[in-house]
Image: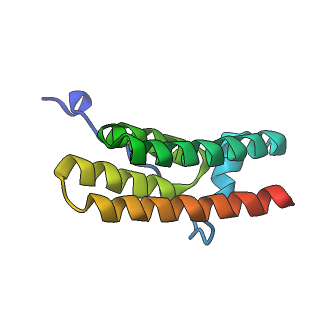
Amino acid sequence: MTPELQRMEWMPSPPLAPVDSPLDLDHLSRMTLGDAELEQEVLVMFAEQAVRLLAAMTNLPAEAGALAHKLKGSARGIGAFAVADAAAHLETAIRTGHDRHHAFAALKEAVAEARAAIEAILKH
């Protein structure tokens, strides 16, 4: 198969500098074209969606892989790369049947940290 036709896994570009926050605000700004009002709206939507998706993963374990995938995409979009990575790990754990409970706990922790950062941003 020619290289052009091979399936390639998408990987986000790593931040140019280490990110000390659960959110890469430079990435968020690029995704919202620097529109501060849109940034706040997107952060609120992400925080609410993350809570709903975690609850759904608990209540609908058969759907957890698809829900983790959805959360991963949303997290990448706003620059919550730790959440995206944790969601990707949960997807893998579900697919392989290894350490699912630990992966879910790590995802919950990453979401909590991102939500705390979002809350701090929205208070300003």
Q: Nearer the viewer, residue 42 or 28?
A: 42
Q: How is the image coloured?
A: rainbow
Pick out the residue farthest to the front: 59
- Locate the N terminus and report the quarter of the image it occupies: top left
Front in this rendered view, residue 81 or 66: 66
Q: What residue lies at 59% left-to-right and 68% top-to-bottom?
A: 19
Position in image of residue 9 (x %, y %): 30, 42
Q: Nearer the viewer, residue 55 or 99?
A: 55
- Residue at left offset 38%, top offset 58%: 104
- Residue at the limit of the structure toward the left, as seen here: 1
Total label count? 0
**The image quarter in which residue 33 lies:** top right
Residue ID at (63%, 51%): 27
Q: Position of residue 85 (x, y in %)?
A: 42, 57
What is the quadrant of the C terminus in the image? bottom right
Is 28 on the left or on the right of 94, as rendered? right
Q: Residue at x 80, y 55 (%)?
A: 122
Residue 113 left/right relative to 91: right
Is 53 positioned to the left or the right of 68 in the image? right
Q: Is residue 22 above or below residue 26?
A: below
Position in image of residue 15 (x %, y %): 54, 60
Q: Answer yes or no: is residue 52 visible.
A: yes
Instruction: Locate residue 3, reporting x and y percent.
Output: 21, 34
The residue lying furthest to the right in this view is: 124
Between 64 and 75, the residue placed more toward the observer is 64
Whether residue 16 is visible to the viewer of this picture, yes or no, is no
